[in-house]
Image: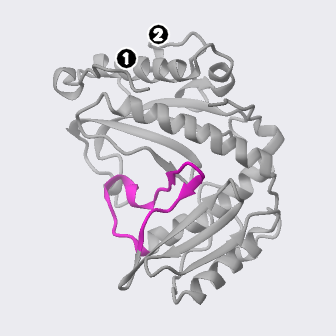
């Protein structure tokens, strides 16, 4: 599979618009799905064509919302066979929100959400945002390809762990793909929000397409809690480093893309950052890890 160029500066307007659109879908999940630990119930999932909400319950029915980045349509499909489509093109967040609400209503789905975006600087409610309206189809297609590549690598990484671990999930708030491993040791919950997350020692691996804070697509790794010396660890590949501003270990996407074996580079970063933590924090590696005898093709 290709590893396309993904320059944040070239598509940041589209990236922000798409992030806001995804937040609308994510907030529908919050409103209707049964809460799960670590907020896993709110995340989206990578598909061969883009991103999906997965099944969302509504009264006696179930529906799914899919971002199709091949046909550039948002599709809503119910278990009874009804479908609605919204074209993905240059349009404001306000227009997208209105079209999605109308499509749901036409299917008999009435859901109320908090319209204020999360993890966005100077947020504007979805139903009033006429500023973010960009949609560059080629950039979105490239993003889909990168997500597919990352999802495949992250799944291979998670397959080597037999302790508690997350599925590979796309979180719409931070607009990143992530996979988490847990040591099995609990942490004291700090507040109601933390009761849904950060209640166990964890290692997180992820990918994001860039932001104003770090305007480059990159892979990241971090630990909760981070033991003393972890971020000073020597990790691989050679381009990986600790970013003080982010407080995370970082490997730029371009370094992966330009390597001789991008999948191997991602797995080397994942393995080395995890192993550094597991050694310093004394994770029970004998019982948490397993050897994959045959490589995944």
Considering depth in this image, is 57 or 164 the residue closer to the camera?
57
Q: Is residue 34 magenta?
A: yes
Name, please, the residue furthest toward the left: 287
Q: Mark 1 and 2 residues: CB-CB less than 8 Å, in contact?
A: yes
Residue for point 68% across, 35% down: 214
Considering depth in this image, is 1 or 193 the residue closer to the camera?
1
Q: Secondary structure at mark 1?
A: helix
Give the image location of residue 173, x and y in percent: 56, 55
Relative to 184, does residue 20 appear above or below in the rendering? below
Q: Quadrant of residue 150?
A: top right
Specify the label residue 194 is tagged with: none
Q: Quadrant of residue 10?
A: top right
Residue for point 56% across, 40% down: 148
| Residue 217 visible from this viewpoint | yes
Report the residue marked by disc 1: 276
Considering only order in the chain, which callout, 2 or 1, is on the residue closer to the N terminus?
A: 2
Report the residue marked by disc 2: 234
Give the image location of residue 56, x and y in percent: 43, 71
Relative to 175, does residue 208 appear above or below in the rendering? above
Q: Residues within 10 Å of mark 2 (few under 14, many from 20)?
A: some
Q: Please give the range of residues in magenta.
A: 32-56
């Amino acid at each position: 599979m290709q590893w396309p160029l993904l320059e944040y500066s070239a598509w940041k307007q589209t990236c922000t618009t798409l992030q806001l659109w995804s937040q609308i879908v994510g907030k529908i999940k919050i409103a209707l799905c049964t809460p799960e630990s670590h907020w896993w119930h709110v995340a989206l999932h990578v598909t061969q064509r883009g991103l999906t909400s997965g099944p969302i319950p509504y009264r006696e029915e179930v529906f799914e919302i899919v971002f199709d980045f091949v046909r550039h349509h948002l599709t809503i499909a119910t278990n009874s066979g009804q479908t609605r489509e919204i074209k993905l093109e240059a349009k404001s967040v306000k227009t997208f929100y209105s079209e999605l609400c109308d499509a749901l209503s036409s299917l008999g789905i009435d859901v109320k959400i908090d319209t204020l975006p999360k993890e966005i600087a100077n947020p504007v409610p979805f139903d009033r945002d006429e500023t973010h309206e960009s949609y560059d189809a080629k950039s979105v297609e490239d993003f889909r390809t990168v997500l597919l590549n990352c999802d495949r690598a992250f799944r291979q990484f998670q397959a080597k762990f037999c302790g508690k671990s997350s599925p590979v999930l796309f979180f719409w708030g931070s607009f990143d793909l992530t996979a988490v491993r847990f040591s099995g040791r609990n942490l004291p919950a700090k507040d109601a929000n933390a009761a849904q997350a950060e209640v166990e020692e964890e290692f997180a691996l992820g990918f994001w397409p860039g932001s104003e804070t770090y305007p480059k697509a990159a892979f990241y790794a971090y630990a909760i809690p981070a033991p003393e010396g972890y971020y000073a660890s020597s990790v691989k590949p050679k381009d990986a480093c600790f970013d003080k501003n982010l407080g995370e270990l970082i490997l730029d996407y371009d370094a992966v893309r330009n390597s001789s074996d991008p999948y191997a580079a991602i797995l080397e970063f994942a393995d080395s950052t995890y192993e550094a933590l597991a050694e310093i924090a004394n994770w029970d590696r004998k019982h948490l890890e397993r050897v994959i005898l045959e490589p995944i093709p």
